[in-house]
Image: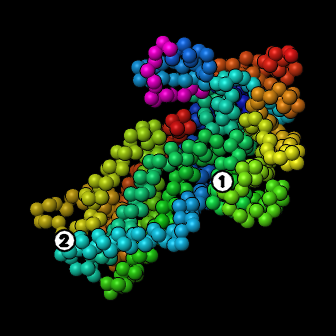
Amino acid sequence: MTSEAISLNPPRSETIRAMNKSGVRVALADIIESFIKWRVAFIFGWQDIAQRYRRSRLGAFWLTLSMLVFIGAIGSVFGALFRASMAEFLPYLCASIITWNFLSTTLNEGCNTFVGSQGIILQVRMPLFMHVIRMMWRNMIILAHNIIIFPLVVLVVGGSIEWTAILAIPGLVLLCLNLSWMSLGFALICTRFRDMTQVVANLLQVMFYFTPVMWMTKTLPDHVSSLMYQLNPLYHLIQLIRAPLLGQNPDALSWIVALGTAVAGWAWALVFFGKYRWRVAYWI
Amino acid sequence: MTFIQLQNVSVEFPVFNPPSRSLKNRVLSIATGGRIERKSDRLVIVSSLDDVSLTLREGDRVGLVGHNGSGKTTLLQVLSGIYSPTRGEAIINGTCTSLINISLGIDPDVTGYENIRLRAAMMGMSPREISAKLEEIAEFTGLGDFLDMPFRIYSSGMQLRLAFATSTAVRPEILIMDEWLSTGDEDFRERANQRMTELVDSTKILVLASHERNLLTNNCNRVIWLDHGKVRMDSSPEEVLPAYFGSA
């Protein structure tokens, strides 16, 4: 387009500007471009992990080891407190903690995605969602290191892994779909309002106790309604991975909730991201 | 068709934690930097570019001059698509690379070869492109076997060589630079300059911000003088440079 065309036809240039700067299309274009450039996100996500554990002998398996120690310690203390059978409690705790750890680290790091990538954002024009993919990929690598513990624990307590475990894969996909819109939203909000990072961290800490992660739903006393966890979307998200690993089918309700929040969440995130994407560079 | 078009572009930064606005601050702010205005009690706005309109076409070799805080860097960032203007519109048509921080993406703990790949990925090169150019980049650095060593053990001159060699391997349509990249010892500097010239010659639009008069005279066919976020002069180097630097 030449300068003449624009001066001849000002209303049209107006629409171009509006289209270029904000709107759902901008959000979609950004996200599509991020997936086209997935390699950059994957290279640097991998680099993040490699950097952390370079020159250590165990490398990233320190993640596995420290998770193993943590689960062992917590398992023996809380197993005794809850008077649960170790054969049941340890695999439950293991699947819970590993899934929760993935969920909460992703959301916490989600808050810092844009602030932490300041150097890149202000120097290279890249799609912003790429930073979210990088962060999610990094956490999936950690999850892959942690999940090794699960079969070990099952083996030690003499249990077995059922075929239902395969259902954990669609569960993980749904979980990631949900975590990605939440991370994108948090990343935007926390770039503008830096205090929100602390608020999110705090909320997640509280949710850790409210959600059946360490405790089992069946240990709830009778006078406490099951609504306490049924109303909690995080419970359903975790259940989609935990239940299959433990040889159970997740409730239909869990699938519905996870699918519903993914669709509604992404719809909101697209509008929100479309509206404020262009402001991110200014807020940093 | 490669072009850049800015129409009535303004860039205003919100400052969320404004310092107390005393009279002293007000007086000082007149001396350097952009205009500081107060929208309300809470929000302070720093205006960095103010109603800038320009069109860059293929073949333009644009030099950008102006005092500190005149908006040069912000303009470069708008031209590279990092900031969308708060008002007005910016249309950038063409692949664009900015050589502002040439070390972005480098990880000191991995080898030179790895770093060439990392830096190239950060510049937006595809894996195929990287593989194709790897040997040429490696050779240009002149680092030889050191490329198999971790980057952190390099001397700072060697580190710059690697960053430079990789960063200048791109062939964008629009090239944006904040000062000329020159680096290394006498021998390398000569080769580096030659490589820079090659790169600059291959791009369709060059935007170079600089404080060096000779550089601008040698490389540019158009100079834009920014002053307090506005275009003060936009013309041939013969006209703008004497006005800006003084005719001496």
Residue B215 seen anywhere in this rendered image of the structure = yes
| SS label for mark 2 | helix
A26 displayed left or right of A172: right
A228 displayed left or right of A111: left
Query: Is residue B18 located in the magenta-colored stretch of the structure?
Result: yes
Q: From the viewer's perspective, is residue B206 above or below residue B134? A: above
The residue beneath circle 2 is: A81
* Residue that extends furthest to the bottom in the rendered view of this protein: A158
Identify the image quadrant of residue A207: bottom left
What x and y, as percent, mark residue B25? 51, 17
Of residues A206 and B78, which is closer to you in this image? Answer: A206
Residue A259 seen anywhere in this rendered image of the structure = no
Disc 2 and disc 1 on one polypeptide chain: no
**Chain letter, disc 2 residue:** A
Of residues B156 and B65, which is closer to you in this image? Answer: B156
Query: Is residue B173 located in the magenta-colored stretch of the structure?
Result: no
Q: Read off the magenta span.
A: B11-24
**Residue found 34% across the figure and 45% down from its top:** A199
**Residue found 46% across the figure and 15% down from its top:** B22
What x and y, as percent, mark residue B31? 61, 16
Q: Quadrant of the N terminus of chain A?
A: top right
* Residue that extends furthest to the left in the rendered view of this protein: A223
Q: Which numbered disc covers residue B73?
A: none
The residue beneath circle 1 is: B106
* Residue type at tag 1: Ile
Please say which color scheme the image uses: rainbow
**Residue found 23% across the figure and 74% down from its top:** A79
Distance Cα–Cα, label 2 vs label 1: 50 Å
What x and y, as percent, mark residue A9? 69, 25
